[in-house]
């Protein structure tokens, strides 16, 4: 297995003016690590994966595999195996022959091919499928054949390009488990591209969040969940999505959403916690009210008869163990979503909620995160408005 390092990697397409698809991308994927590249369509995640594989030329920067610069190394000599969104199987060949195809091209002895294919088939629980052809297989079985074809080559790293997007929801869940189990058993370096943040959260050791302007944040799944670096990451990571709403700081540095005052205080300038030139007195620059974005996850709002946020229940989505309550608040353009574990309120009723302590996220005018000032009476120095995550 091998580490993969990117330094200042960029991709442009020719034209009158350079059009950057990716710019100044730099991070290292450690040996044996599972890293997921996640982001909306068009952000360049598949392009970045293809540049690692050597299927796309890079416009600037360097890519290294196991400490070796591979910018000019052809794909076949990089020692990587790629699993595509389309299974790319040979319909006229058996499962055995599809998995063995690369080994036959490399002129591996027949006995070794047979042993390797059988070992991979056992690992993927496909021994009974070796004599079938792809048209006789389900979507999940075909994807396992594609993965088996990659494993049998014993590559230095695996690259997955949205491998589950063609499967239905139930099969996607099953295949997520299979891929996680495979990574644990192989201890292999894996780079996985998806637009589905649920896949990213459940599979990754680290997530690289890509947006229209490049890399937005890199970190462990729960770190991104608890401490998103900006509004883009906050709105992308988490299911259901975070409630994002406009807010302001009053003259005392208290956070307000319309008439509601939340338990969150801006840091004093000396704390160095402010971002986007927002001061503790609620000013941005020359005394103008700071236009902030406040984020609260639906699961971090709770019913509270004395809650600061009051509205009318528009809709209740009952999902069984939990319900999604859509709450219309007069000061907000969009209803708040609240996740309720117990019996939800009835549609049409008035309802009050409050945020869970330490679970309010605030972003400055530039969209970047602002850490809350620590409570004076908190000897541990924990933040009142934002969860502290190691």
Image: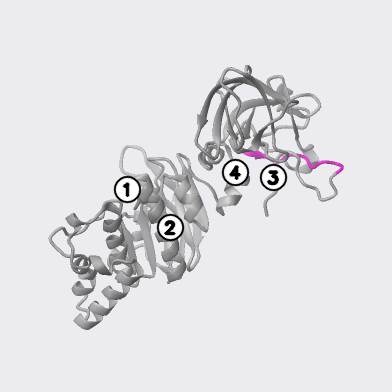
| Residue in the image at 43% along x and 68% along y | 188
Cβ atoms under marks 4 and 2 closer than 8 Å: no
Relative horizontal placement of residue 108, taking residue 303 as reference (left or right): left
Compare residues 334 and 30 and report the one nearer the observer.
334
Task: Give whichever of discs 4 and 1 has the lower sequence position.
Answer: 1
Return the residue at label 4: 228
- At mark 3, the secondary structure is loop
**Distance from label 1 to label 3 (Cα)?**
36 Å
Q: Position of residue 266 (x, y in %)?
A: 75, 35
Residue 107 falls in image quadrant: bottom left
Q: Callout 3: few (<14), some (14-19), or many (20+) C-alpha neighbours within 10 Å?
A: some
Compare residues 166 and 161 and report the one nearer the observer.
166
29 falls in the magenta region: no
**If the image is split into quadrants, where does the N terminus sit?**
bottom left
Task: Give whichever of discs 1 and 3 has the lower sequence position.
Answer: 1
Relative horizontal placement of residue 229, taking residue 105 as reference (left or right): right
Residues in magenta?
A: 368-377
**Distance from label 3 to label 2 (Cα)?**
29 Å
- For the stretch drawn in magenta, what is the main secondary structure? loop
Mark 3 vs mark 2: in front: 2
Task: Give whichever of discs 4 and 3 has the lower sequence position.
Answer: 4
Count the marks. Answer: 4
376 falls in the magenta region: yes
Mark 4 vs mark 1: in front: 1
Residue 252 falls in image quadrant: top right
- At mark 1, the secondary structure is loop
Mark 4 vs mark 2: in front: 2
Return the residue at label 3: 387
Task: Give whichever of discs 4 and 2 has the lower sequence position.
Answer: 2
Residue 291 seen from this side: no
Task: Give whichever of discs 2 and 1 has the lower sequence position.
Answer: 1
Return the residue at label 1: 167
């Amino acid at each position: 297995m091998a580490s993969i390092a990117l330094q200042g990697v960029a991709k442009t397409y020719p034209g009158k003016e350079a059009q950057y698809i990716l710019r100044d991308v730099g991070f290292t994927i450690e040996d044996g690590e599972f890293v997921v590249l996640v982001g909306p369509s068009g952000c360049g995640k598949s392009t970045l994966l293809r540049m690692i594989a050597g299927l796309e030329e890079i416009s600037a920067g360097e890519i290294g595999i196991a400490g070796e610069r591979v910018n000019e190394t052809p794909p076949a000599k990089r020692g990587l195996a790629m699993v595509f969104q389309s299974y790319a199987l040979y319909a006229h060949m058996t499962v055995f022959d599809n998995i063995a195809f690369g080994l036959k091209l490399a002129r591996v002895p027949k006995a070794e091919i047979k042993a390797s294919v059988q070992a991979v088939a056992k690992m993927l629980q496909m021994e009974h499928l070796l004599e079938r052809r792809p048209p006789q297989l389900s979507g999940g079985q075909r994807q396992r054949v594609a993965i088996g074809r990659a494993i049998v080559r014993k590559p230095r790293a695996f690259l997955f390009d949205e491998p589950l997007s063609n499967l239905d929801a139930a099969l996607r869940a099953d295949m997520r488990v299979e891929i996680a189990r495979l990574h644990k058993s192989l201890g292999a370096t894996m780079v996985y591209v998806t637009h589905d943040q649920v896949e990213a959260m459940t599979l990754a050791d680290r997530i690289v969040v890509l947006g229209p302007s490049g890399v937005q944040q890199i970190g462990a799944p729960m770190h991104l969940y608890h401490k998103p670096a900006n509004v883009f990451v906050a709105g992308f990571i988490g299911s259901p999505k975070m409630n994002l709403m406009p807010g302001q700081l009053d003259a005392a540095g208290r956070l307000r959403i319309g008439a509601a005052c939340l338990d969150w205080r801006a840091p004093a300038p000396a704390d160095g916690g402010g971002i986007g030139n927002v001061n503790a007195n609620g000013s941005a620059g020359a005394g103008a009210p700071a236009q902030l974005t406040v984020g609260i996850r639906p699961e971090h709002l709770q019913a509270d008869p004395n809650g600061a946020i009051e509205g009318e229940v528009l809709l209740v989505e009952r999902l069984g163990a939990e319900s999604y309550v859509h709450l219309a608040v007069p000061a907000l353009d969009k209803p708040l979503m609240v996740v309720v574990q117990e019996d939800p309120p009835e549609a049409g009723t008035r309802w009050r909620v409050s945020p869970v302590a330490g679970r309010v996220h605030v972003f400055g005018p530039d969209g970047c995160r602002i850490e809350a000032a620590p409570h004076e009476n908190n000897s541990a120095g924990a933040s009142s408005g934002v969860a502290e995550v190691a």
